[in-house]
């Protein structure tokens, strides 16, 4: 039975920060996807005629679905997730395998497309939650027997397999951006479990040796070319380097205070910025709000991360701490890769910006993750 008293323990700092990011995202999508303004708009009706609210409405529906999932997640004590995770994980793996039998979308076997509903589902997004919960279960159980540390080599190998299998399946789609997020989730959970330095050094050595092998033997020609263009954008400014080149121009044109939302002459509205409402939304935001606006966005993310670190430390058990650590790893990987990608500091991988980018599967995953964090906080030991 759900105890309504624990609702008083909800973390409103998390709610406010998430709502702020979602609101900024909706306003940004409305401005970016509008027909180009010419500066002659005077009345409100003049602005409304230029707005394309289709994506805003769809993202609003995505958010409401996410809120429903959030409410379902906080109802049950998070310890209940231990009994469900094995089945959810297997179901996610099955969906990732079935994806290889459907038609590719944008060159990736990543979506189940439902044309009748004009919707698509990306199982790799939901698999992030399965990985977080499964890894948290494995690692926390070992921590309980080893005085707060993960020491068992067997547990570490099992954790590597749990993360490794979906990572390989996603890389074969190919989607190296999501694979990067999976690895970051594993790293953060093992970090909070205080894994030994020997394992860290071994992992660093394996990574140093594995990256060249992955470049030459695992990556497709297109993916290798993306990395080459990332290292030297001048190789292909007309195609592969075009996205980053236009993104950097849009970011630079925003200068300190930005051009403002719903204003004339923005590169995002003129469609010079590719994937302007999804992967490269940060470029459109900074063009509109400038360096100050971009800084505010980054500060909001880091406030959320630092708040969640505090929640991880205050959890009632190791399982709760590991759950929150996995969510932090997922969020930080997305923010680091997406913002770095738009500024030419990271390769283009197609990772969305949490709570801001348009996309149903990603927003649903993030809202479930918020529900997990709130669940851990609401059931923390409270001093009387």
Image (tube, grey):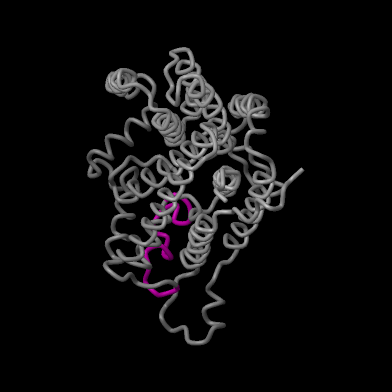
Magenta-span inclusion, residue 177: no
Indicate whether 7 appears above or below 232.
below
**Residue sitting at 36 percent across and 42 percent down?**
348
Q: Is residue 80 left or right of residue 166?
A: right
* Frontmost residue, 286 versus 379: 379
The spot of residue 135 in percent (x, y) is 52, 27
Magenta-span inclusion, residue 276: yes
The spot of residue 110 in percent (x, y) is 55, 35
**Residue sitting at 38 percent across and 73 percent down?**
260
Stretch in magenta: 262-279
The spot of residue 284 in percent (x, y) is 40, 61
Indicate whether 23 appears above or below 362.
below
* Frontmost residue, 207 versus 307: 307
Q: Is residue 15 left or right of residue 118?
A: left
Image quarter hosting the N terminus: top right
Residue farthest to the top, as pictured? 154
The spot of residue 139 in percent (x, y) is 50, 24
* Frontmost residue, 166 versus 191: 191
């Amino acid at each position: 039975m759900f105890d309504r008293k624990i609702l008083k323990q909800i973390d409103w700092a998390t709610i406010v920060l998430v709502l702020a990011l979602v609101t900024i995202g909706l306003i940004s999508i409305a401005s970016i996807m509008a027909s180009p303004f010419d500066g002659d708009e005077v009345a409100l009706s003049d602005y409304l005629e230029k707005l394309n609210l289709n994506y805003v409405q769809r993202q609003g529906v995505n958010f409401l679905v996410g809120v429903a999932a959030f409410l379902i997640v906080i109802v049950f004590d998070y310890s209940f997730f231990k009994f469900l995770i094995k089945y959810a994980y297997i179901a996610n793996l099955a969906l990732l395998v079935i994806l290889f039998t459907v038609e590719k979308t944008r060159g990736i076997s990543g979506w189940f497309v439902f044309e009748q509903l004009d919707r698509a589902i990306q199982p790799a997004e939901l698999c992030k939650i399965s990985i977080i919960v499964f890894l948290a279960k494995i690692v926390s159980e070992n921590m309980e027997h080893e005085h707060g540390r993960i020491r068992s080599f067997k547990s570490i190998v099992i954790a590597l397999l749990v993360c490794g299998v979906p990572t390989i399946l996603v890389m074969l789609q190919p989607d190296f951006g999501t694979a990067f997020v999976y690895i970051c989730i594993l790293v953060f959970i093992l970090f909070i479990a205080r894994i030994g330095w020997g394992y860290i050094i071994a992992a660093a050595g394996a990574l140093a040796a594995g990256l060249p092998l992955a470049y030459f033997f695992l990556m497709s020609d297109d993916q290798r070319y993306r990395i080459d263009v990332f290292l030297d954008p001048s190789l292909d400014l007309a195609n592969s380097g075009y996205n980053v080149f236009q993104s950097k121009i849009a970011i630079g044109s925003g200068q300190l205070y930005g051009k403002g939302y719903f204003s004339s002459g923005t590169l995002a509205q003129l469609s010079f910025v590719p994937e302007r409402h999804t992967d490269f939304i940060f470029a459109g935001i900074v063009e509109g709000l400038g360096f100050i606006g971009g800084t505010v966005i980054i500060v909001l993310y880091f406030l959320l991360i630092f708040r969640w670190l505090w929640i991880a430390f205050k959890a009632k058990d190791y399982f709760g701490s590991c759950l929150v650590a996995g969510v932090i790893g997922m969020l930080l990987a997305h923010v680091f890769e997406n913002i770095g990608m738009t500024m030419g500091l990271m390769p283009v991988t197609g990772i969305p910006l949490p709570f801001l980018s348009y996309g149903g599967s990603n927003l649903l995953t993030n809202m479930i993750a918020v529900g997990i964090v709130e669940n851990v906080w609401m059931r923390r030991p409270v001093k009387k």
